[in-house]
Amino acid sequence: MKVINLIIFLVSLSVIYVQYQINEFSDIQLVLYTDMGEGVYKESSTSRFDNYNMDFPNLSLSALPIKGIVARYYLLGGRFNEALELLDQSMNDNPYIMFNESLKSDLYWELQITDSIVYYAAKAFSGIPNNQKHFINLARAYVHIDKYEKLDSIFKIVEKKAVPDIVMSYLSSLLTDEEKISQYGKEIAKKIITRDYEFGEVNDEIKVAAQYVLVGQENVSKIMELDLTASDNFNKKNYSAAGKLYEQILEKYPFEFAYYENAGISHFQAGDYDAAIRNLTIVADSLNPGTGKAEFVISQALYNLGKIEEACAYAYRASEYDYRESFKLIGLYCK
């Protein structure tokens, strides 16, 4: 009986110790992540784990190597030797997530040791390629060693599952040297602009970067100037001038349906129905944003040209997209 009680007592002590260690490091993690989130390093924070046993348990509640987390904090404070020592000691602590390899790439980036930057970034990426941190680190490394062609090779691996941060990293990396942007890079940019992409959400920042990749930053600046001038002319009811300016934009950038739409509407307002139909047909038949707006204006332009039957057909096409005003045109044109 005494032996059983002793065993129970020892097990209880072990459980209490483990729970104490877990709770202790949970508190330490809060301190570390708060400091790292603020981008600051505090000696007072390090005193919390200077005498902490990082070997048991060796993983955090989120399965990250405890020594790796502390190493990340040391890296923030410029304590590179201590950070590297901890990373080396914990390379086998949950190695499948490549946390230490990714952090080593960051450490060697700070020290600008090129071979190690590339080696550890590539190792982390090969382990988990769809991790955005791994992609960003490797893209940074390839730009650093002027291997722009490798940017395409790693993006091809993640293209179909790329999250916005990966897409933005790829485009931004390409833009560090526009002369080295490949045809593949331009095709990806075009897919983003024309909404013909297989990866996820595309925000405005990504779309602007894609424009830069596709036509160059200088041309994008010229397009923006023309767009402002065209919009100003339209607002002043100089519709013909606005339409011609939008067509100048399309000569440089024939990928965005809104410019065709704006050109078409401007020409329609100016009474140039043929020019309106020419621009808006490209929207309706090729770019097809699925709003019904282009079909609606084409219907009116055709009616004004006396092409009643065709006007009716386009009014019905606009109604298929639930464009509200098109239903009125059906009542007027389709008798």
Image (cartoon, helix red, strand yellow):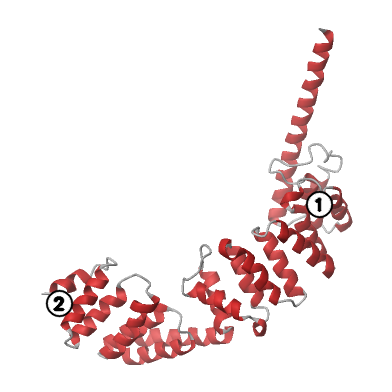
Q: Mark 2: few, some, or many residues within 10 Å (few <14, many ≥20)?
A: some
Say whether residue 235 is visible: no
83 relative to 34 in the view: left or right: right
* Image quarter hosting the N terminus: top right
Q: Position of residue 319 (x, y in %)?
A: 24, 68
How many labels were placed on the picture?
A: 2
Q: Position of residue 75 (x, y in %)?
A: 81, 57
109 relative to 276 in the view: left or right: right
Give 252 or 24, whichever is nearer the viewer: 252
Write the residue at 32% across / 86% down.
266
Furthest residue to the left? 335
Q: Secondary structure at mark 1?
A: helix
Instruction: Give the distance between the C-alpha atoms of the residues marked 1 and 2, in whole angstroms.
Output: 73 Å
Q: Position of residue 56 (x, y in %)?
A: 81, 36
Write the residue at 67% across / 82% down.
180
Label placed on residue 85: none
Q: Earlier in the sequence, mark 1 or mark 2?
A: 1
297 relative to 131 in the view: left or right: left
Q: Mark 1: few, some, or many residues within 10 Å (few <14, many ≥20)?
A: many
Q: Quadrant of residue 13?
A: top right
288 relative to 180 in the view: left or right: left
Amino acid at the residue labelled 2: Tyr
Write the residue at 27% across / 86% down.
269
Q: Which residue is mark 2?
A: 333
Give 54 or 306, whichever is nearer the viewer: 306
Q: Which residue is mark 1?
A: 71
Q: Secondary structure at mark 2?
A: helix
Amino acid at the residue labelled 1: Ala
Give 9 or 20, whichever is nearer the viewer: 9
Above-or-below relation of 245 to 11: below
Say whether residue 117 is visible: yes
Q: Position of residue 115 (x, y in %)?
A: 84, 68
